[in-house]
Structure formats: C-alpha cells, structure tokens
Image (spheres, rainbow, N blue to C red):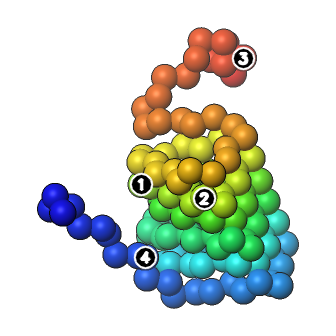
Amino acid sequence: MFGRKKPAPPKIETLIGHGTRIDGNLIVTGGVHLEGYVKGNVTTGPDGSAVLSIGPQGVVEGIVDVPRVVVHGEVRGDIRARDKVDLGAGAKVSGNVSYGVIEMAAGAVIQGRLIAPSAPVPADEAKAAT
C-alpha cells in the first residue's frame, strides 16, 4: 500500500522434523526449519550466513547464534541474531535476545532481556563482569 514490500520468506534447504532429537551442537548454513528438539547450541557455518526457523513444535535448549532467527516454538537459552529476530505469536524464549532488528507478534513471550544493537551495559552488570 505504501510502497513497502514484504520480504520473501527464507528459502528452507534443510528440515529437521517433529520427533527428531539432536543431542549436541548444530551448525547450520542456508535455511533450516526445525520442528524437532535440539539440546545444544545452534550456530552458523564458516560463511556466517544462515536462517533458522523454529516451528510451533520446535525446541532449542541452548544458545542460538544465527544471523536471522524466526521463532514460533521455544528457545531455552539466549538468542544472538545480528540481523533480525522474528517472534511469532506462539514463541517462547527463556533467555536474553540480542538483535539487529526485532519483530514480535502479540502473544510472544520473552523471559529475559532484550539487548538492542550497541546497547550500553548497565553499570551494575559491568562491575559484576570485572
């Protein structure tokens, strides 16, 4: 209507189906859709570009460090997405979310902090880190 085009959905190259369980770290490249369970960290490959889409039945129990993350399921750990985080209405995140851009639907739940790009670290946390 106002000249804004909705971006095309990410191209999914890999599907991890419901009922699949991965115990260990997962390194993703390209587009990955997860409907299963990952107990471990999810990171991107050496080229540093990937899109992780977590479906309504998908669960990640670990840190997600991927440039673009779409969540409709659950993440039990921090999300670090330098490009974009998209949280659907059924998304549940138990951890901090670092993002370049964030989009949240009504009903998404974050039990943690939102960390904007280049956000200053609160003084009390900076003291605790040293």
Residue at the spot 54% in from the left edge and 35% down from the top edge: 115
Give above or below for 51 relative to 20: above
Residue at the spot 41% in from the left edge and 48% down from the top edge: 101
Tell us which disc is closer to us: 4 or 1: 4
Question: Marks 4 and 1: CB-CB under 8 Å?
Answer: no
Left or right of residue 6: residue 33: right
Residue 10 circle label: 4
> Percent position (x, y) of residue 4?
21, 61
Label 1 environment density (alpha carbons within 10 Å; few <14, some 14–19, many ≥20): some
Circle 3: residue type: Ala
Question: Marks 1 and 2: CB-CB under 8 Å?
Answer: no
Distance from the alpha carbon under mark 1 to that under mark 2:
20 Å
Tell us which disc is closer to us: 2 or 4: 2
Left or right of residue 102: residue 78: right
Dot 4: what SS?
A: loop
Give above or below for 116 relative to 12: above
Sequence-wise first label, 4 or 1: 4
Residue 89 circle label: 2
Give above or below for 4 relative to 116: below
Dot 2: what SS?
A: loop
**Numbered circles on residues, count:** 4
Distance from the alpha carbon under mark 2 to that under mark 4:
19 Å
Q: Nearer the viewer, residue 129 or 55?
A: 55
Left or right of residue 3: residue 80: right
- Determine which residue is flagged by label 3: 128
Circle 2: residue type: Ala
Sequence-wise first label, 2 or 4: 4
Q: Nearer the viewer, residue 66 or 113?
A: 113
- Determine which residue is flagged by label 1: 83
The answer to whether residue 42 of the structure is visible from this angle is no
Sequence-wise first label, 3 or 2: 2
Distance from the alpha carbon under mark 3 to that under mark 1:
28 Å
